[in-house]
Amino acid sequence: MKNLISIHFDGPIAAKHAVQLRTFSKTLGHVQTAIDRAYLDIKYGNVWKNARLKDEDYTHTDFLLQQTREGGFIADLLGDKDSGDVVTRIYNAVLPAYEQAQAVVVPDQPKLVDLAEQRSRHYKSGAQEPIPYAELIDNPDPGQTRAYGDRSIVKEFDQIASAIRARDGDGSVVEVDLYAGKAFPKFVFNSDISAKFHNVVSIRALGDPVQLSITLRGLDSGNGGTSKAKAMNLLSKKEFNLHIHTDRGFGSLRKYLKKRNPPPFTIVACPVLEYGAFDPLAGDMYFIAIVADEKNSVPEVEE
C-alpha cells in the first residue's frame, strides 16, 4: 500500500463538495509543516525550536497533491516509497493526544503563576535545589526530547482541527487518514474532539528549577499581566522569554537592562513545559531568583 495522508472535510464545511480556499490552503500548510517536523525528528533524533530543512531535505518531504475526490471534500497527499517512516512518526505523535481527547472530561490546567509561587517558596526554604543548566544541554531528559518532537507535530494538527472549532458545532468534521504500507486508525475531529484536543496539547506546567547565566535584552511590565523579559542564555547562545510573576522580581531585574554591554548574571528559573515538552536551547522560563552577579553574591529571591 502507498504512503499517503488523506484529508477529508465533511458536513457544512464541505457544502457542495467544496471548501473555502483559506481553510484548504491553511490545512495543507499545517500538514506540510507536520511532515517537515517529523522528518527532522527522525533525521536528528530530536527537533528544536526554529529548526529548518536543508536543501537536501526537501526531496524527502515532498508529498504530491492528487486530484480531489467527492464524499464531502477529500484531498490525498501521496508520499514516495521512503516516506513511510515520516507518516508513522506523525501517527505516533498525534495518537496519545487524540486518545486523551476522547476522555469525557479533560483536566483543568494549573495556573503557571501559582506553580511559580510554589517553586519560589520551595527554593527559598531550601526544599528544592536548582540543577545546573548545562545538565539540560548535555543530558537532556529523553521524555522531554520525545515530547518536544511530538508537540511540534501535534500543534499542526491542532491548527487543522481549528477549522472545525471555529464553526460553532454546526456538524462539520475533518478526518485524517494515514497510510504507511498499512492503514492506521483514522483521526476524526468533530466539534467536541477538536476542542478537547486543543485543551490537551495546550497544557502548560513548570519543570524543576535550574540555574543559568544570562544577559537581558528587554523588559516588558505586562500592563497588569505577567511581566516578561527578553534574555540571552549565555550557554546556548539563544534568546528566550523569561516570565516574571511579581513586581518585586521585575524590579530586581531592572538594573541589569543596559543598552550597551549588558552585565551577565546568574538566575534560578523554571522551564515552561508545553504538552510535557521543553526546548533546552530557547524555551520559555519563569523567573524565581537572582543568584549572583559581579558585584553581589547575595541571592535575591522572589516573594
Image (cartoon, rainbow, N blue to C red):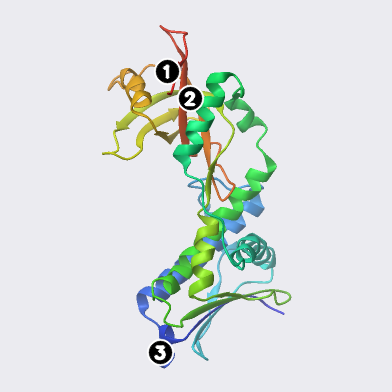
Q: Nearer the viewer, mark 3 or mark 2?
A: 3
Q: Amino acid at mark 1?
A: Pro
Q: Residue at x 69, y 42 (%)?
A: 142
Along the line of sight, which residue is nearer the eye, 36 or 14? 14
Label 3 and label 1: CA atoms lie apart by 59 Å
Q: Earlier in the sequence, mark 3 or mark 1?
A: 3
Q: Earlier in the sequence, mark 3 or mark 2?
A: 3
Disc 2 element: loop
- 150 left or right of 263? right
- 263 left or right of 176? left
Q: Nearer the viewer, mark 3 or mark 1?
A: 3
Residue 146, how many percent across, how many down? 65, 49
Find disc 2 in the rendering and name its residue. 234
Q: Residues within 10 Å of mark 1 (few under 14, many from 20)?
A: some
Quadrant of res 303: top left
Q: Is residue 2 visible?
A: yes
Q: Earlier in the sequence, mark 2 or mark 1?
A: 2
Disc 1 element: loop
Q: Residues within 10 Å of mark 2 (few under 14, many from 20)?
A: some
Q: Amino acid at mark 3?
A: Ala
Give the quadrant of the N terminus: bottom right
Residues at marks 2 and 1 touching, judged by CB atoms closer than 8 Å: yes
Residue 24, how many percent across, how many down? 42, 76
Q: Amino acid at mark 2?
A: Leu
Along the line of sight, which residue is nearer the eye, 225 or 233? 225
Residues at marks 3 and 1 touching, judged by CB atoms closer than 8 Å: no
Find disc 3 in the rendering and name its residue. 15
Find disc 1 in the rendering and name its residue. 264
